[in-house]
Image: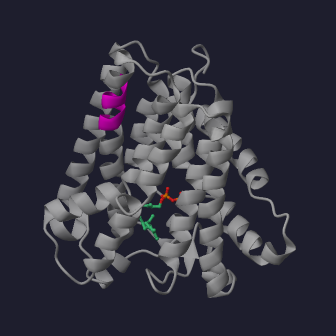
Amino acid sequence: MSTIDYSFDKQFLRYQDCINEALPGAFTGDDEAADMTMEAALYSLMAGGKRIRPVLMLAVSDMLSLSADIVLPFAAAIEMIHTYSLIHDDLPCMDNDDTRRGMPTCHVKYPEAIALLAGDALLNRAYEIMLEACGDGDLRKIRAANFMARMAGARGMIGGQTLDLLSEGKRIPADVLMVLHSKKTGCLLMAPVIIPAYLCSQGKEHAIIEEYLMEFARHIGLGFQIKDDILDVTSTKDVLGKSTGKDAAEEKSTFVTLFGLQKAREMLQNETDSARNALFELRNSGYDTRFLEDLNDYLLLRNK
Ligand code: GRG
């Protein structure tokens, strides 16, 4: 990243363009039998998400001077895993939503079973891409792919989703809500921050960097969910591109329903401040953290 003409908006767009160019090629069909599933997967993948997770991954890589070529398969994989989770989360057996990213959800546009398969196909392709990248036997890549699997799996995002489903209609304690979201939302924000560190050379200095990165990721992860809960009650379907007000209607425990809007806003500010403090430690260690600092503010202020 150039130090002279830095602009957050331009850099954000560059990262988004980079991933948007990589994704369709990583998911083209060569099997006619799977055409409709591939089409449905691509429909959801290219429906215009913010690309926060791959942007984070590319930004942390830049900060650590890691080449984009090395990280790009992992960046594509995380957006595929994220998109699969959204497709499955929207299904009638889960949240039963009809709009996502401002468009009909995958199971509304395609038959429900095809949407299920499209999610499965995205998940499988994500692992295929990461395994292809690991083909040179580089242990750092294998460790990175393993971390992705753990963050997305039953001890990570899927575990959080399970806790969420089992909590429906109940008022859960705040500490359970924290664990639920550190898994459901937090794990897929932890992976893009930590994977670039895993892909770099290891050593004592790197262990300290990983600590600060983990601290940063933990706080943006929780903050991301608090913001999501706030937007659910303060924004509209037109702006968000997905349904709003469902949490309260379905008596779900959220940061807003448990703590109230004012307190949830304070909690979000605290998470943002703590994430910024972790970045200051990295900056003091000589890293260029400007983009991540600005991204942290963007996540605080985002309106969708
Ligand atoms: C079905 C295994 C499985 C998991 C589902 C991701 C998820 C777990 C549920 C989605 C429900 C939800 C609203 C979670 C809150 C945080 C979140 C992941 C929001 C959506 O992410 P954004 O805002 O979406 O990055 P875009 O569309 O911009 O990519």
Residue 122 coordinates in the image, percent (x, y): 63, 63
Q: Position of residue 205 (x, y in %)?
A: 36, 16
In the image: residue 28, left or right of residue 244? right
The location of residue 227, given as percent across then percent down, is 35, 56
Looking at the image, is 265 positioned above or below residue 177?
A: above
Magenta stretch containing residue 210, yes or no?
Answer: yes
The residue drawn where x is 46% and y is 24% is 290
Q: From this viewpoint, is residue 13 visible? A: no
Q: Is residue 236 visible?
A: yes
Q: Please give the name of the residue rendered at 37% of the width and 79% of the height, measured from the top-left corner.
A: 246
Q: Is residue 101 above or below residue 282?
A: below
Coordinates of residue 200 in the picture (x, y in percent): 51, 25
Left or right for 253, reference 241? left
What segment is highlighted magenta in the picture? Answer: 209-215
Q: Residue at x 68, y 82 (%)?
A: 109
Decide: is 231 above or below 266: below
Q: Main secondary structure of the magenta part?
A: helix
Residue 233: quadrant of the picture: bottom left
**Nearer the observer, 234 or 229:** 229
Q: Quadrant of residue 69?
A: top right
Check the image and name the residue furthest to the front: 137
